[in-house]
Image: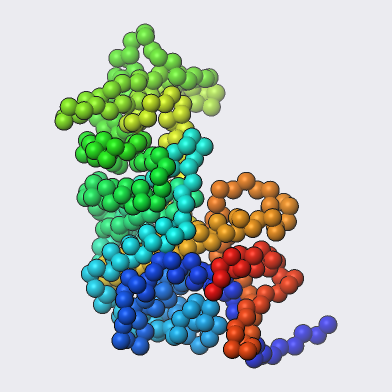
Amino acid sequence: MELGYGFTDLLLTSHAGLPAFSHLLKSARLRAAFGPSLKAIPDSAIFTTEIALLALGKTDFEAVSAYRDDPAFTQLLGLKRLPSAEILRQRLDGAPQDTIERLREANLSLLQAHGKPLANRQGFVPLDIDTTPMDNSGSHREGVSYTYKGFDGFHPLLAYLGEQGYWLAQELRPGSQHAQKDFIPFFKRTLAAARSLTGGRLLVRMDAAHDAEETLAACLDERSDFLLRWNPRSHNAAEAWHALGEDKVHWASGPGYFTAVLDQTHPLSDGRSVRRLTLITRRTAEREQLLLAPEYELEGYWTSLELPVEDVIDLYQQHATCEQFHSELKSDIGLERFPSGKFATNRLVFSCAQIAFNVLRLLGGRMKQNRPLLPKRLRDLNQVRFRLRTVMQVLMYHAGIVVQHARRAVLKLGRLTAHSRWVMAVLQTCPS
């Protein structure tokens, strides 16, 4: 059959998920956060536009130009008009200093309205704090410097809450800044935000970059359960092994290795003490190949938990899930290279990305609730959360038609389009 080409006057959209996105974004209360404005495009509309672009994986300011002549995009997002790329950049560059705090409160309002952090199988609500270097090599952006990963970029500090991985707190930092520098104020602010969202038993998990007495003291001061990877620093693994003598406390063993465990209490300088688990491994073979000389490994954990060693290690291994959350930010949303040369503007973009991340995560929860509409092979998957890329591809990029009738707009989906019933069920849970 011969294929012809032509145009239609129907109001088409490739972003049928925008009404659901806009509905949840209202809970961030951006209009209340930025107040009324005499400008043609108020500040709340500027940040709504930036957040929506990031939720679609558009990280550069110029991306808004593709939607300025698209009335469906503006209408579904709930705005009267979109800014140009130049205005979007200028307004972010000229934003007041307290804008970061306003966006932080907006993110917290969003999570308080819709985010109910889930506990893990051990009954703890995890609060994972971690850093992730962001590669901005070859750029001259303010704040870009050499990171511990060996490239030039930024080194932000992030915190995720619950099994769903809500992005609770963040702080964009220069690439060369150590994770522990100015960490305690961030930790206390994050813990207070987490407690405002859940009454469950929080478990703060951090890696060895935060192994410092001030971190342990802050955890004790805040009366928070914590699990912190110990940094052996100058400790020698072989010497630690031989110091055990013959009275080794067995923890695990197998072909070519033996691991001993020390469960000790270490004093702090203020007179308090903290439990530390130390694992020392002697390895004599690697993949059935005998080693010429034994190799020794040393690792450990600071914790407030009175649990068996196996449970403590299992809980810490779950901390690795935040690497997937980092990946969703960098790969799915696409925010690794920042759009502005100004550090202050990139901080605002990072805060907008946090809100976009959480709205997508919440939409993923709505999709999970309507999983019975999926084919059986997808319905039976036991997932705690959907990856953001799945939410974006299935929901945010779903096609539709906007029909104007009787002073009312109706968004229609293709009845036979893949996942259309699933998308419609999600849209109907988010009334306009």
Which of the two residues, 164 or 133, is positioned nearer the viewer here?
Answer: 164
Up/down of 311 relative to 355, above or below = above
For the point 30% across and 14% down, the residue is 243
Q: How many marks?
A: 0
Question: Could you say which quadrant of the image residue 10 lies in?
Answer: bottom right
| Quarter of the rendering containing residue 313 | top left
Q: Is residue 291 above or below residue 411?
A: above
Could you tell me which quadrant the C terminus lies in?
bottom right
Q: Is residue 77 visible?
A: yes
Q: Which residue is drawn at 56% across and 48% down?
A: 384
Using the image, determine if residue 356 lies above or below residue 220: below
- Judge left or right: residue 135 versus residue 358: left
> Could you say which is closer to the camera, residue 163 or residue 24?
24
Q: Which of 411 and 283 is in front in this view?
A: 411
Counting from the top left corner in percent of width and height, residue 157 is at: 32, 52
> x, y percentage for residue 102?
30, 66
